[in-house]
Image (cartoon, rainbow, N blue to C red):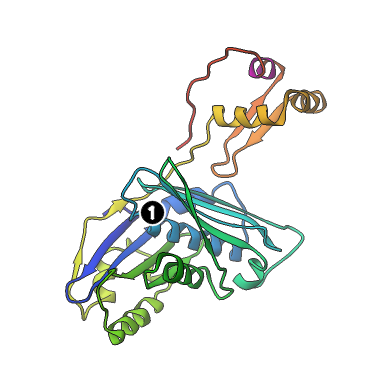
């Protein structure tokens, strides 16, 4: 099975469906150009696993974006996945402040999940539970989506993983079964995802249940930044400011926070950028 994948499954005798995500290469590529501390790394890793788990259920061409912003310490976290499970993410924290736990990191932060189908994006607000991102999203599923869910997330610098269980809408679930499954997923740790976690981990975790496992789907890192998008931003800044910055620094350098790609613009580029009738070709990073 792919090293980076999502494996969906369902219980034969219980109206509950689930998905398990395991990220290694994709996750390490996301970290490559950043030097996050341990807590921010863990939080971003939890966000990566959670966003992929949500995105795998998309039935249309579009994307899921998880955002946490305006916190006292965590200024911005963005994690995005397309319906094809192409993932990218980044985080920015206040370098002059520190946090010892998720509650301190996200104090006063606003969290939202945005579903974009290319036509009319829908944004749901997530109440931040200071205990964990998983708890915050469980509340979101229960209140906003009205789907009772159990979510377990793990992450370190080497891997990101998680499992999502959800009750099937319109069908009754025995409370004893629901509590038992919650206990099982709550026992997960990073050690369980050291190898290529998938069918084997699902079988081990739910050994007492009859579980139907589906074909894993690969997850990859892909950044949608492009020369066109960067130059659109420069145009929004304005010609005067671009020329002033160029006069001071001799060239403009723009770094993508998602993939780390650096693009530089000199005087010739700025002339071209603000000239009329210039057509650019595509330019993206994988």
At a point 28% along the width and 60% down the height, the residue shown is 7
Q: Nearer the viewer, residue 77 or 3?
A: 77
Q: Which residue in the structure is indicated by mark 1?
A: 55
- Main SS, magenta region, reads helix
Secondary structure type for disc 1: helix
At a point 77% along the width and 60% down the height, the residue shown is 96
How many marks are shown on the rendered structure? 1
On screen, residue 200 above or below 33 = below
Q: Within the magenta stretch, is there residue 271?
A: yes
In the rendered image, is residue 6 in sight?
Answer: yes
Residue 65 image offset from top left, x and y in percent: 49, 51
Residue 126 image offset from top left, x and y in percent: 53, 64
Residue 44 image offset from top left, x and y in percent: 54, 59
In the image, 111: left or right of 51?
right
In the rendered image, is residue 101 in sight?
Answer: no
- Quadrant housing the C terminus: top left
On screen, residue 205 above or below 62 = below
In the image, 169: left or right of 53?
left
On screen, residue 269 above or below 122 = above
| Within-10-Å neighbours for mark 1: few <14, some 14–19, many 20+ | many
- Quadrant housing the N terminus: bottom left
Q: Within the magenta stretch, is there residue 150?
A: no
At a point 41% along the width and 63% down the height, the residue shown is 161
Figure quadrant of residue 13: bottom left
Residue range corresponding to the magenta coloring: 269-273
The single residue placed furthest to the bottom in the displayed view is 176
Residue 230 image offset from top left, x and y in percent: 60, 31
């Amino acid at each position: 099975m792919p090293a980076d994948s999502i494996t969906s499954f369902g219980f034969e005798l219980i109206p509950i469906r689930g998905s398990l995500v395991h990220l290694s290469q994709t996750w390490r590529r996301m970290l490559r150009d950043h030097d996050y501390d341990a807590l921010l790394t863990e939080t971003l890793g939890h966000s990566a696993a959670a966003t992929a788990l949500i995105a795998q259920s998309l039935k249309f061409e579009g994307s899921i974006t998880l955002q946490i912003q305006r916190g006292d310490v965590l200024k911005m976290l963005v994690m995005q996945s397309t319906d094809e499970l192409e993932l990218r993410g980044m985080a920015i924290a206040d370098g002059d402040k520190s946090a010892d736990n998720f509650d301190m990191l996200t104090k006063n932060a606003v969290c939202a999940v945005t579903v974009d189908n290319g036509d009319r994006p829908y944004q749901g607000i997530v109440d931040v539970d200071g205990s964990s991102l998983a708890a915050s999203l469980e509340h979101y599923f229960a209140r906003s989506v009205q789907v009772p869910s159990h979510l377990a997330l793990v992450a370190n610098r080497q891997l990101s993983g998680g499992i999502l269980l959800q009750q099937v809408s319109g069908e009754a679930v025995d409370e004893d079964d629901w509590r038992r499954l919650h206990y099982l997923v709550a026992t997960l740790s990073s050690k369980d995802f050291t190898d290529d976690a998938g069918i084997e981990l699902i079988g081990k975790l739910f050994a007492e249940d009859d579980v139907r496992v589906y074909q894993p789907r690969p997850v990859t890192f892909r950044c949608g930044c492009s020369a066109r998008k960067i130059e659109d931003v420069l145009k929004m800044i304005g010609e005067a400011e671009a020329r002033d910055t160029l006069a001071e620094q001799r060239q403009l350098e723009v770094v993508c926070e998602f993939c780390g790609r650096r693009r530089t613009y000199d005087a010739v580029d700025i002339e071209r950028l603000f000239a009329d009738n210039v057509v650019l070709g595509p330019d993206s990073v994988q």
